[in-house]
Image: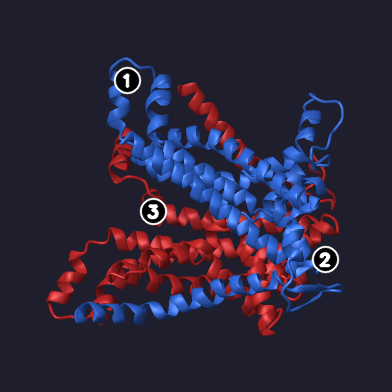
Amino acid sequence: MRALRVVVTAIVVAFLLGPLVVVAVVSINENRYMDFPPEGFSLSWYAQMVTDPAWRAAILRSLVIATASAALAVSIALPLAYALRTYRVRLAPVLYALGILPFMLPPVISALGAQVFWNATGHIGRIENVIVAHAIFFSTLPLITISLAMESMDPSLPEAARTMGADQRTTFRTVTLPLLVPSMVTGFAAAFVLSLNEYIIAFLVAGFSVETLPIKIFNSLRYGFTPTIAAVTVVFILIATTVFSLFAIFGNLLRFLGADPGVLERAEAGR
Amino acid sequence: MSERRAADARAWVVLAYPVAMLGVFFLGPFLIMLAASFYRRIPGGFYEPAFVLDNWKQLLSELFVDRALFSLRVSLLAGWLAVLVAFPFTYALTTMPRRRQVALLVLVLSSLSLSEVIVGFSWSVLLGRAAGISNILVWLGLMDEAEAYAPGFWAVMLGLLSIAFPYCVLTMYPPLSRLDREVTEAAQMLGASPWRTFWTVVVPIARPTIVAGFLLVFVFTLGSYLISAILGRPEHWTVSVFISDQASFNANVPFAAAMALFLTIVSLAIVGAVLWFERRAAAREG
């Protein structure tokens, strides 16, 4: 059993790491073709990623879209999660399902929906179309993190504020909201990272005029390989790993991912 | 009664904005898609308002039925394979010391956040002839000549699994970490081997978790676009590739809308059916 555990873990780690390692190796290859074993060492592909205006523009565009759409997603999720937990709304299950549904369905459906929607309005090929489409699609993530935080919040805290004379608005601003900030940040981060990597929605909504980074990578792949793709990939991997490692260091990553506190204590003791 | 109504009114003040956003930008597109699916297509990339059933009839065309069945088979297989590896892995993960759990979960989260285009590219490198696994084997002297494994069916499957696997692990992690250790300890105290404990105690208790992981991978891979476009030949393209190609390159939006609505119905029906069976089974066991 112990041996099997080691084998399964090793297979999974190899499976997850394998592609990343190969890409990292290709990205520092001196020559412009993919070669194995690599020949020479060069960081020129990383330099090109920043100096080439087309790559730089795509990276910046993707960062703008990810930031704006993640903020918009949180702004949609926060009042929804708050109201469904605070008031007894009769339609609560329906409204919660409405918030969960976009992310549950295959993204091509949201993608096509957003395309026909913006076509119908005549407002075509604009960056804000992508931002709104991403915000709706990824609003499910902050909705889940904020709802979980609302659920685990001690109800006596806002109650105490109310008893001491604070009105609903003051209670929300001074008690509930500060307690929700961590879940808002994690929801934002999840939406941000996934938006940065999203392809099909961005492509169908405005793929020919707003070239995001994933679209740029895919287009470059179509016209043949350049090691710049590998360099960009490595940077993305580093960004994601850094963000999640910071979570692990400054927050309780395992708790956030839903681990049981008691089990965690035991795991701690067993170390 | 009036107090209830006042509370309702306050709730709707808060809810107005999120519900309006979801209504306009999520439900709105569905209504437009529904309308567009009955429009008449004008060759050359346009469509005009009409009420024709041609687009829905086209769902019966061999081309679409072929793609849909292929996608269904691929997603079912991917679901099974993912669960087969993810379940024992996640179970093992929850029994590890905390630091190792964090390290492995950071790896899982990092690969989860990789774009499909990057995962597809990585596997095409790894499985390709120029700088992949077969080159390492040649280099080690285990193989005579480098071979290309991509594009191909198993390349698509590997790509889909690396996209879906992290989500599968994250779905299974909370329930498995909450699994009552006293139960497994009791089984072992009574003399069951760890292996036997796993099969006769852990797996039956965690069945809803396994179903949830399977469903997630199923729905997820059904929607995957880039993996099959990068790692597969046209015969390996999934229904998502077919739909978006119809919408963008063939400029046949009405047909694409009909297919998207059909895919919505199928996804919801499959998820609903599995949840219903699961609930019935749970109710029967009491």
Residue with the mark numbered 1: B188
Callouts 3 and 2 in the same chain: no
Colour red maps to chain: A
Residue B243 in picture, x, y percent from top left? 73, 60
Callouts 1 and 2 in the same chain: yes
Residue B98 in picture, x, y percent from top left? 38, 40
Name the kind of residue labelled 3 in the image. Phe
Q: Residue B2, which numbered label?
A: none
Q: Earlier in the sequence, mark 1 or mark 2?
A: 1
The answer to whether any part of residue A120 appears in the image is yes
The answer to whether any part of residue A65 appears in the image is no
Name the kind of residue labelled 1 in the image. Gln
A136, above or below B265, in the image: below
Mark 3 vs mark 2, CA separation in Å? 44 Å
Camera-side residue of B260 and A174: B260
Q: Colour of chain B?
A: blue
Quadrant of the image occupied by residue B69: top right
Residue with the mark numbered 2: B250
A101, above or below B183, in the image: below
Mark 3 vs mark 1, CA separation in Å? 31 Å
Quadrant of the image occupied by residue B115: bottom right
Q: Residue at x 17, y 65 (%)?
A: A156
Q: Quadrant of the N terminus of chain B?
A: bottom left
Left or right? Give the position of A167 relative to A143: left
Residue with the mark numbered 3: A256
Circle 1/circle 2 CB separation < 8 Å: no
Camera-side residue of A89 and A200: A89
Q: Circle 1 sits in a helix, a strand or a loop, which is it?
A: helix
